[in-house]
């Protein structure tokens, strides 16, 4: 009876330790939080202005396209309103 109980206790302790081991590793490992912060520092600072300039030109083009589209939409809407105002209303 004692050996059965001892085996059951031992098996329970082993399975619990196996189940909890990933949690203890994650709690004790501070490396993932500090590793991404170190990576951007290694990038040289000289290409950044060129990248920013490229982003700025892309953004300006996108904004110009958006403005052109909005202007076109407004024209179409006003044209539609003018056409609706010209047509006589049918009596009911």
Image: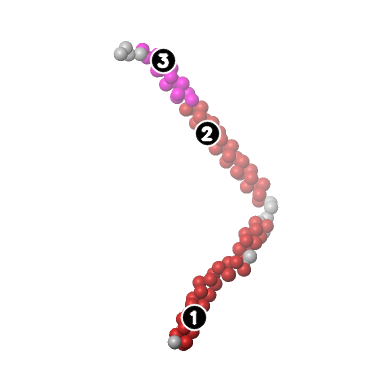
Separation (CA) of disc 3 from disc 2: 29 Å
Q: Is residue 59 magenta?
A: no
Observer-nearest residue: 41 or 92?
92
Query: Element under label 2?
Result: helix
Density class for disc 1 (Cα within 10 Å; few <14, some 14-19, many ≥20) is: few
Q: Quadrant of residue 24?
A: bottom right
- Would residue 89 appear left or right of 24 to someone viewing this image? left
Separation (CA) of disc 1 from disc 3: 89 Å
Count of all numbered marks drawn on residues in the image:
3
Determine which residue is flagged by label 2: 66
| Prevailing secondary structure of the magenta residues | helix
Density class for disc 2 (Cα within 10 Å; few <14, some 14-19, many ≥20) is: few
Q: Earlier in the sequence, mark 1 or mark 2?
A: 1
Determine which residue is flagged by label 3: 85
Whether tag 1 and tag 3 are in contact, CB under 8 A, the answer is no
Whether tag 1 and tag 2 are in contact, CB under 8 A, the answer is no
Determine which residue is flagged by label 1: 9
Residue 55 lies, with reference to residue 12, above or below; the image says: above
- Would residue 73 appear left or right of 64 to someone viewing this image? left
Q: Which residues are magenta?
A: 74-88
Whether tag 3 and tag 2 are in contact, CB under 8 A, the answer is no
Query: Element under label 3?
Result: helix
In the image, residue 66 lies at what x, y percent? 52, 34
Which residue corresponds to the image point at 61% horizontal and 41% vertical from the top-left?
56
Query: Element under label 1?
Result: helix
Q: Quadrant of the N terminus?
A: bottom left
Which residue corresponds to the image point at 50% horizontal and 81% vertical from the top-left?
10
Q: Quadrant of the C terminus?
A: top left
Which residue corresponds to the image point at 53% horizontal and 34% vertical from the top-left?
65
């Amino acid at each position: 009876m004692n050996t059965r109980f001892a085996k059951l206790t031992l098996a329970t302790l082993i399975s619990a330790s196996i189940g909890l081991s990933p949690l203890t590793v994650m709690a004790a490992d501070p490396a993932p939080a500090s590793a991404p912060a170190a990576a951007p520092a290694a990038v040289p600072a000289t290409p950044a202005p060129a990248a920013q300039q490229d982003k700025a030109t892309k953004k300006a083009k996108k904004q110009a396209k958006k403005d052109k589209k909005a202007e076109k939409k407004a024209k179409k809407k006003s044209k539609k309103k003018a056409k609706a105002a010209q047509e006589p209303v049918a009596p009911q």
